[in-house]
Image (cartoon, coloured by chain):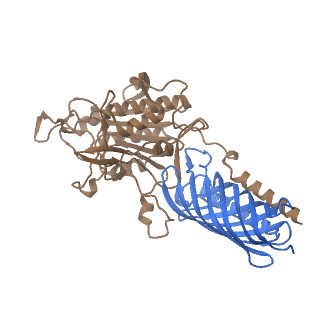
Amino acid sequence: MKKKALLIVIVLFTLLALLSCELFLEKPPKPTIHALVIGLDYKNNFEFDDPSEPYPDDDLNGTINDAKEIAAALYRRGEEMGTEVKVTFMLQEGTTPLPDTVAQAEADYPLYPIIENIETQLQRINNEMTDNDILLVYYAGHGYGGPTTPEQYQGALALAETKEAIGEPVKVEVLQATLATIKGTKLLIMDSCYSGAHETEYPTSPPDDDNASVHLVYDPSQFYLLASAPDELSWELAGAETHGYFTGQVLENLGWEHEDSTEIEVYDPDTGTRTETIVGNIAAGSEAPIERNGTIFLGDLFANIPIHTASDGGTRVNQTPQTGNGPLDLVLFSEHW
Amino acid sequence: MGVVAGRRIKRIILIAIIALGMVGTNLLVAGVPSEEAFGATVESTWYGSIPSAFHEDELPIRSHLSFGGTITPFAFGISEAWELSAGVTGFYTTRSMIYGTTVWRPFAALGLAFDATYHLDQQFSITGGSAVFLSMYTQTREFAPLWRLKISTGYELLQNLGRNRLVLSIPVSVDVRTDYISVSSGIGITWRFERKQKEAM
């Protein structure tokens, strides 16, 4: 009797494992990563009350390096790990003249990073995506926040300007609402001040209780890797290769080296694609420092970015990277797909 | 709608199998209780996280491996067949297997365990227990409480070990969190040292 019972138990457990084990289910198709890479250095801005006078106070020196190299690092890491990475650059670089109007920017400069163009590009990418794909949005630029900024603008993006639209912040909700319309899995990587404001709260209990509002915002297909907490600044590090501290760490974790150069295919609105050469490389055959058995997890990327301490007017301040809470983690690259 | 209903049915089938497993383990019983003892247990289990509806997971269950142990400084016989024990317990659960673009995170947990064991003969016993844990996702350092209900069958492996006892166990447990439930099943080994021994029945 006891032996029979033991046999029943063993058979039931084996059946349970077989039924539920991912190994016995059909593999989903391999995803493509669609990377929309936004970077601004604000070097084409002018004084608010004098359009002939350049406004250098908000210039950033590392963001264009950040955007270009992160795109190249993702592209090369994808090549090394067998995943296609399609890159779209939306850069405001250097002293390119300001478009006169938003309409002109939309018509003549479709990759100029104003919110209208970003929404257009996201919809284009959405049309190319399948449900299995990953949309990766990277942003390097200013973020609004701090005690003097109104609540509704905390974490807002400082996108590019036109002569008719100077410096209107793009609120967190606007970006969230746009991303919510995109199919597949989404990853938002931001190297900007107060970027932690973009993280939505994880609901720690089911929706039938009093935290229903959290459930309305939480999207399990949306993942985050953010440079700082909602009340912290993000810092650039000066050096031979100027980078944001956060992006520098991400690049290092992906195995990026500031040697040689990399040619990547990027989206071009006129020709479909074009080749861009970026300084730096990921060595052929190399493994990323955070790679585990042929896979790179977002959680490991986050866990390997230390808190940065900087001096803000003589006061020591922290820059604490953020990612979403809860049990779900994103597989960024995997040789097992 | 059809996909959601299919997932729900699959979940119900899996939970029914686990429940049957628990009933099955009830058929394996007994042993000799300790008068007073201490010991340790190590376990290795398959660990299944059951996503809640709001996780919108494409799988009804996510498979991990889990490794744990319990140090039991106190175990007391309270009757001819019953024994109570308490100890410190902990486990580490790996990330779930890769499926698509998401996995469930690895975590570690530390807590206090309370068990009651019923011995039916020289070799077989059944243990029911509960444990409260503080769990932590190891990548994000995010803490959460966890409550475990456990049932386990025991089979005494070797006789004539003097005051030492070695018990092979098949633990089945349900972990309850505020946001989702998990189940696990596997195998364990318990070592016990009898400070005082009871006579065999």
Q: Can you give x and y, in whole percent of width and height, for residue A74 in the image?
A: 46, 33
Q: Is residue B64 left or right of residue A153?
A: right
Q: Is residue A179 left or right of residue B17?
A: left
Residue shown at 85%/65% (left/top)? Answer: B123
> How many numbered marks have been drawn onto this rendered protein structure?
0
Residue shown at 75%/63% (left/top)? Answer: B192
Q: Is residue B142 visible?
A: yes
Q: Quadrant of residue B190?
A: bottom right
Position of residue A99 relative to residue B95, above or below, is above
State which quarter of the image contains the C terminus of chain B.
bottom right
Residue at the far top in the pictured view: A260
Instruction: Look at the image and give the colour of chain B.
Output: blue
Chain that appears brown: A
Residue at the far right in the pictured view: A1
Q: Can you give x and y, in whole percent of width and height, for residue A29 in the image?
A: 59, 39
Position of residue A213 relative to residue A130, above or below, is below
**Foreground residue among B23 and A248:** A248
**Foreground residue among A303 and A106:** A303
Position of residue A52 relative to residue A218, above or below, is above
Q: Can you give x and y, in whole percent of width and height, for residue A115 in the image?
A: 30, 43
Residue at the far bottom in the pictured view: B79
